[in-house]
């Protein structure tokens, strides 16, 4: 069986690379915590959303916290791994705003400094923005 190149992108996509998983994470990053609101705001069917949330909990991306006993009801909170996805979601949103969405961006974020947020990826070493022509791989995963 051919598996392709060993790659952290492929491994990450196994966890979060499905539409309903990403949309659920979007809602949780926007502050929604309860299943019904996440379902309504994503448009996902309840069974699919339940499966995606379970997978994100099992992968350590979300924490499921019970807030009511009868009937049992839960809220979802991002873990450290989940919070680390926020820049990825912001980048995906910016890409969609620029290359897919027609018109004004539907969602805007404000940074803690008070300015409208326009996230960029920078080099930790020099602080310069990252762009494709300015980068190259120095190690590649093995092809299986």
Image (spheres, rainbow, N blue to C red):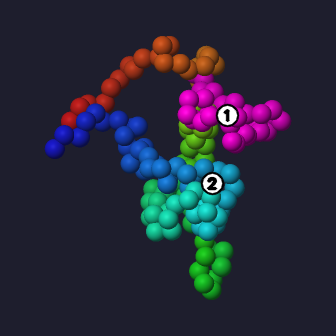
Residue 108: give x, y in percent of width and height.
72, 39
Secondary structure beneath label 1: loop
Q: Residue at x 26, y 31 (%)?
A: 142
The count of marks equals 2
Q: Which residue does the numbered mark 2 point to in the structure image?
A: 27
Highlighted range, magenta: 96-123
Q: Which residue does the numbered mark 1 point to in the structure image?
A: 103
Q: Which sits earlier in the primary sequence, circle 2 or circle 1?
A: 2
Residue 126: give x, y in percent of width and height.
61, 16
Q: Reply above or below: 116 against 29.
A: above
- Which quadrant would residue 127 be assigned to in this image? top right
- The span from disc 2 to disc 1 (Cα, nearest Å) is 22 Å
Q: Residue at x 52, y 60 (%)?
A: 44
Crowding at dot 1, Cα within 10 Å, few <14 / some 14-19 / many 20+, comes out as few
Q: Reply above or below: 46 against 3.
A: below
Q: Residue 98: in sight, yes or no?
A: yes
Relative to the observer, which residue lies in front, 138 or 118?
A: 118
- Residue located farthest toward the top when viewing the structure as drawn: 134
- Which quadrant would residue 85 be assigned to in this image? top right
């Amino acid at each position: 069986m051919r598996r392709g190149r060993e790659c952290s992108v492929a491994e990450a996509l196994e966890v979060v690379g499905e539409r309903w998983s990403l949309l659920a994470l979007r809602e949780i990053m926007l502050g929604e915590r309860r299943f019904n609101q996440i379902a309504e705001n994503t448009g996902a069917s309840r069974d699919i959303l339940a499966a995606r949330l379970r997978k994100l909990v099992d992968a350590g991306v979300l924490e499921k916290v019970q807030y009511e006993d009868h009937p049992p009801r839960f809220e979802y909170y991002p873990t450290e791994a989940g919070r680390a996805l926020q820049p990825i979601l912001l980048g995906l949103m910016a890409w969609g705003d620029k290359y897919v969405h027609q018109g004004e961006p539907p969602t805007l974020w404000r940074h803690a400094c008070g300015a409208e947020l326009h996230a960029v990826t920078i080099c930790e070493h020099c602080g310069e923005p990252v762009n494709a022509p300015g980068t190259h791989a120095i190690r590649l995963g093995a092809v299986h």
